[in-house]
């Protein structure tokens, strides 16, 4: 990584880094592997097992074999150690300065400053202080496993980033190195993780924990840079794959769940008129599932764009307050009825299209004729799209999401609808607001019907649905 760490000082980094890195790896691998063979061929096996060289007075075996004198090895070792230390002392400050300049970790901003000669003086001073703390411990072996973990994690994350960018086919990922393949990066990542746990499993867990803390801190501070986010790319690819899978076949009735479209009416202040309709949607979904909240504004989009944006921000804030997980939008249409019809027909994507519409009751239908006309037009559009329509009448009297209520949820099951009326109270009871309520099912029978058998059949039906409820048959 020496070339990458000092890439800013290289004349042609794209050419120098691959050649220099491969040559360095080949050179060191040749030296290390040849040393293994040469030691095995020249040193007695009993001496090789003597870890600290106590049998030869704690001296270095390689120094005793050196020609013409043991000082060659001692001086060489000292210079090698000094060179590695100086390399880290020059590379690490520049790396720290680059991270600080990128603004990824906000509290490192002071170290982005350079001296008049372009040297990262502040980052260098911090690096020296960290090194001094390690030296003052008096035993570098205590730090060696932890430092190894961070080096391995650095190499592992570089491999992971390269593999993810290649697999996602990210447009801005265009490596010029011809002999690269994503499988090499995955192999490198696997080896890094394996060596970490083979070296010290507890140090490996500590290093991973620190890496997660740093990542979450960056995510929390909302750092955004022009190169994008690999995790976001993965999420986009996964979402695309899932949407295509959902499009393959129609959903089975047993897998049916309400995907809600909330049609929210705005008041004169450009705010959602019925706040509790969002509470109802949140309670019905128990904080999960797809919910899309849409408002329709009458007018010319080119003239009231700002009004639409303000309304969208108000809806988003209300959704956040009521903990409604989902999306929001505002449609500007010349006619409210046409806008509602367009939203119902086109909202959603593939298998994630809403199948249930929640709309408020038109309370002013007696005074305002357009109110009931829009409502009927919306209801016809919902029916034509084969969607379920929920109209919570008296929404202002519905409980808040922070309240807990007791009592009964009564379901009047007049027409067999495949179990939707059974499912809705069951979903409501998953939320803490309705959890303590009991469910009662009422069905209507005529005098000539066998009400006893009807009650028995309904209880069997509920048993197969795994829904606990009292059953009452009301005779007309």
Image: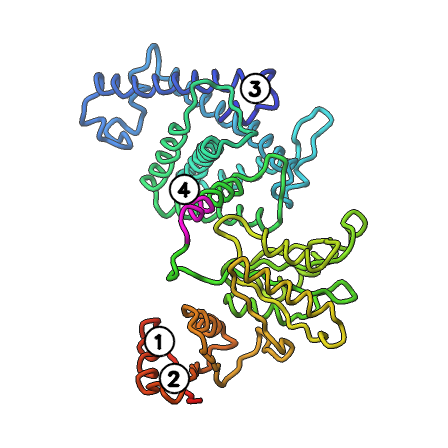
**Cα gap from disc 3 to disc 2, whole angstroms:** 77 Å
Please tell me the numbered disc located at residue 462. 1
SS category of the residue bearing label 3: helix
Q: Residue at x 53, y 28 (%)?
A: 173
* Image location of residue 217, percent across then percent down: 57, 49
**Cα gap from disc 1 to disc 2, whole angstroms:** 9 Å
Callout 1 touching callout 3 (CB < 8 Å): no
Whether residue 245 is in magenta: the answer is yes
The mark nearer the N terminus, 4 or 1, is: 4
Single out the mark in the foreground, 3 or 2. Answer: 2
Q: Pointer 3: what residue?
A: 13
Callout 3 touching callout 4 (CB < 8 Å): no
The mark nearer the N terminus, 3 or 4, is: 3
Q: Pointer 4: what residue?
A: 142
Q: Pointer 2: what residue?
A: 471
**Foreground residue among 472 and 197:** 472
């Amino acid at each position: 990584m020496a070339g990458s760490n000092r890439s800013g000082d290289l004349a042609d980094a794209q050419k120098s880094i691959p050649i220099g890195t491969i040559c360095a790896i080949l050179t060191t691998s040749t030296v290390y592997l040849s040393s293994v063979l040469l030691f095995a061929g020249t040193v007695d096996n009993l001496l090789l097992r003597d870890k600290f060289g106590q049998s030869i007075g704690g001296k270095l075996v390689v120094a005793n074999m050196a020609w013409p004198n043991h000082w060659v090895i001692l001086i060489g070792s000292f210079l090698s150690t000094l060179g590695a230390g100086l390399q880290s002392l020059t590379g690490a400050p520049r790396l720290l300065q680059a991270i600080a300049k990128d603004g990824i970790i906000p509290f490192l901003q002071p170290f982005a400053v350079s001296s008049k000669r372009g040297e990262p003086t502040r980052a260098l001073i911090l690096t020296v202080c960290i090194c001094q703390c390690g030296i003052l411990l008096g035993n570098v072996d205590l730090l060696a496993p932890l430092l190894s973990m961070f080096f391995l994690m650095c190499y592992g994350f570089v491999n992971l980033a390269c593999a993810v960018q290649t697999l996602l086919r990210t447009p801005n990922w265009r490596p010029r190195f011809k002999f690269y393949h994503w499988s090499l990066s995955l192999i490198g990542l696997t080896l890094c993780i394996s060596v970490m746990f083979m070296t010290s499993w507890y140090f490996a867990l500590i290093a991973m924990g620190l890496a997660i803390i740093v990542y979450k801190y960056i995510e929390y501070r909302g750092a955004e840079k022009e190169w994008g986010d690999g995790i976001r790319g993965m999420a986009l690819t996964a979402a695309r794959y899932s949407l295509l899978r959902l499009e393959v076949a129609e959903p089975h009735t047993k897998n049916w769940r309400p995907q809600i479209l909330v049609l929210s009416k705005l008041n004169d202040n450009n705010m959602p008129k019925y706040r509790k309709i969002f509470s109802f949607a949140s309670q019905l979904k128990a904080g999960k599932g797809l919910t899309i909240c849409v408002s329709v504004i009458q007018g010319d989009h080119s003239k009231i764009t700002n009004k639409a944006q303000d309304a969208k921000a108000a809806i988003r804030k209300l959704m956040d307050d009521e903990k409604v997980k989902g999306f929001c939008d505002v449609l500007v249409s010349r006619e409210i009825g046409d806008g509602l019809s367009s939203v119902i027909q086109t909202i959603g994507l593939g298998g994630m299209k809403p199948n249930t519409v929640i709309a408020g009751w038109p309370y002013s239908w007696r005074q305002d004729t357009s109110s009931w006309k829009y409502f009927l037009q919306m209801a016809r559009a919902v029916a034509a799209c084969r969607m379920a329509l929920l109209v919570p009448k008296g929404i202002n009297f519905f409980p808040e999401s922070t309240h807990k209520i007791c009592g009964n949820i009564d379901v009047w099951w007049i027409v067999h609808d495949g179990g939707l009326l059974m499912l809705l109270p069951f979903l409501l009871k998953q939320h803490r607001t309705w959890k303590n309520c009991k469910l009662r099912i009422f069905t209507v029978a005529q005098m000539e019907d066998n009400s006893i058998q009807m009650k028995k059949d309904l209880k069997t039906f509920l048993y197969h649905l795994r829904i606990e409820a009292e059953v009452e048959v009301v005779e007309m």
